[in-house]
Amino acid sequence: MNITIVGTGYVGLVTGTTLAELGNSVYCVDIDEKKVEGMKNGIVPIYEPNLEEMFLRNIQAERLFFTTNLKEALDKSEVIYLALPTPPGEDGSADLSYVLQVANSIGEMMTEYKVVVNKSTVPVGTADKVRNVIASKTDLPFDVVSNPEFLREGFAVEDSMNPARVVVGSSSEKAKEIMATIYQPFTNTGIPIIFMDEKSSELTKYAANSFLAVKITFMNEIANYCEKVGADVDKVRLGMGSDDRIGHRFLFPGIGYGGSCFPKDVKALIKSGKDEEFNFQILEATENVNISQKVILVSEIEQYFGGSIAGKTIALWGLAFKANTDDIREASSLDNIELLLKKGAKIIAYDSVAEKNVQKVLGNKIEYAKTMYEALENADALFIATEWPEFKNPNFKLMGEKMKNKVIFDGRNMYPLEIPAQNGFYYKSIGRKTITN
């Protein structure tokens, strides 16, 4: 089938490459000429494990194409996926201007029946808005479908090729048949496709992400309480997770959640509720707790240094909001950098993948190290903000030699407590006993 993807951000590029891998001819549209030219030359504009190999394979197979010309791609395709940004406004609402602008263009340009698929994360009722915009520009038949994505950054290729389920919201039997054909390679292997109405589909994405944000935040609250009463959050987590009603995933405590989805989607659902005079009390509490959780270790650092960190050098390992991505949107590292700088600390950071994105935001406000150990030179303390695999088994002897003080504040609980203890480190993590060697 011929398919157009409008928008080549994280969701659009992974979705387009996946659909090409499934045998479709996919035309990816973006207004950024430099970005499009780069993709034509095999340059993947985002960091995502295993994406480049699949990307290049489908370009070579002539199933994956890139253009800035929406009309050209539209004329070649029966199905058009909208994978456009829906950034939060000041009030938390999702900005639908990009989606509706493209919908307007589709209405003006289309010459035959099209299925327009909302892949972007959008509020309940967006399918109706898109439908109304297109209908105002054409009398030709078309259908609008909601088909939310459930990709985890860092695991997007795995999730796209082996989804737990495919959710399709549509009131059109014709559109349902077309979407079933597209996803037949999945359903043939037992992956369910769940059909529902458009509004339920739109809400499913927000509900799923918001629930996971609540789950993470609840575990962080439990971790903080563990420290008060002398319990070990790792043991509590294992005990909870072994209950199959709860499961082990998203129970790892840390310095809050970030990224492009959870913060934005929680805000948007809260705002959508208020628009209907409904108060999502749990989500409001989740958001407030997460804001505090992100910087919970800063007060611990201040306390360790006698109440002031002015003039102290803090080595920071990790800048991305999570491992295996270069995404720094709502990253806890940025919140901590801002607060540490405000309190007079000097920061030397290391993240080989996300560094360039942070430089665009912070410039020379902080220093950047070429290696994880270079960041430790004469550091008063190490702060771990991202759980990159290279941080999991470091040379503690070398770390101690380079650092001014053998002190670690770990926002991701990277190490069993006995490891820093055996190596003579002061080690403060989340929800566990503090090692005070």
Image: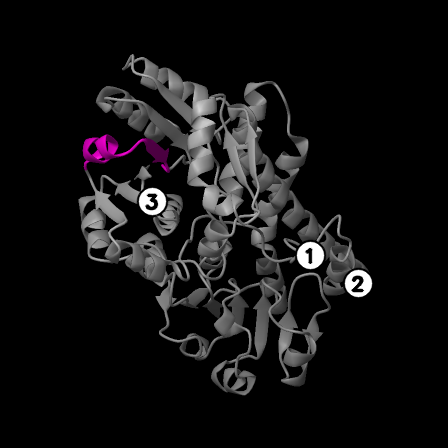
Crowding at dot 3, Cα within 10 Å, few <14 / some 14-19 / many 20+, comes out as some
Q: Residue 98's quadrant in the figure?
A: top left
The circle on residue 24 is 3
Residue 330 point in image, percent of width and height: 47, 48
Mark 1 and 3 residues: CB-CB less than 8 Å, in contact? no
Give the side of residue 384 with respect to residue 220, left or right.
Answer: left
Q: Earlier in the sequence, mark 3 or mark 2?
A: 3
Mark 3 and 2 residues: CB-CB less than 8 Å, in contact? no
Quarter of the picture holding the N terminus: top left
Q: Residue 319's quadrant in the figure?
A: bottom left
Residue 123 point in image, percent of width and height: 49, 28
| Residue bearing mark 1 | 248
Q: Residue at x 63, y 85 (%)?
A: 423
Q: Earlier in the sequence, mark 1 or mark 3?
A: 3
Q: How far is mark 3 from mark 2, CA to CA?
A: 53 Å
Crowding at dot 1, Cα within 10 Å, few <14 / some 14-19 / many 20+, comes out as some
Frontmost of labels 3 and 2 is 3
For residue 309, above or below residue 76:
below
What is the tally of numbered marks visible in this picture?
Answer: 3
Helix or strand or loop: what does disc 2 sit on? loop
Give the side of residue 216 with respect to residue 182, left or right.
Answer: right
Q: What stretch of residues is rendered in magenta?
A: 69-84
Helix or strand or loop: what does disc 3 sit on? loop
Farthest residue to the front: give it.
188
